[in-house]
Amino acid sequence: MQQRDGSLISALLVERLGYERRGLHERAAMVTKTLRDLGYVEQDGVTETATVEPAAERAVKRRVKKRGE
């Protein structure tokens, strides 16, 4: 039963996210109520999001000094 509830909650979270992205806030609120009825408690904190560009540094070659500089 626990696994079934977990997959139902996962499916509802995905459904709610889709509604929020499309601007259907009333539907998202209905899904949130259903999640609460199932005993799901939202965690406060930082939510990870994808970024367009990676935050990795790139290696840069040093400029070679020419003779006479």
Image (tube, helix red, strand yellow):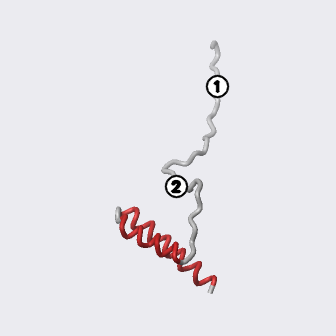
Say which residue label 2 marks: 50
Q: CA distance from mark 1 to mark 2?
A: 38 Å
Q: Toward the viewer: 41 or 22?
A: 41
Residue at 58% x, 57% y is: 44
Residue at 63% x, 13% y is: 69
Q: Quadrant of the N terminus?
A: bottom right
Say which residue label 1 marks: 64
Amino acid bearing label 2: Ala
Image coordinates for residue 23, horizontal then vertical, percent: 35, 62
Image coordinates for residue 64, horizontal then vertical, percent: 64, 25
Crowding at label 2, few (<14), some or many (≥20) Cα neighbours within 10 Å? few
The answer to the question of whether label 1 and label 2 lie on touching residues, with beta carbons closer than 8 A, is no
Q: Which SS class for mark 2?
A: loop
Amino acid bearing label 1: Val
Q: Which SS class for mark 1?
A: loop
Q: Is residue 2 left or right of residue 22?
A: right
Image coordinates for residue 55, horizontal then vertical, percent: 58, 45
Residue at 63% x, 39% y is: 59
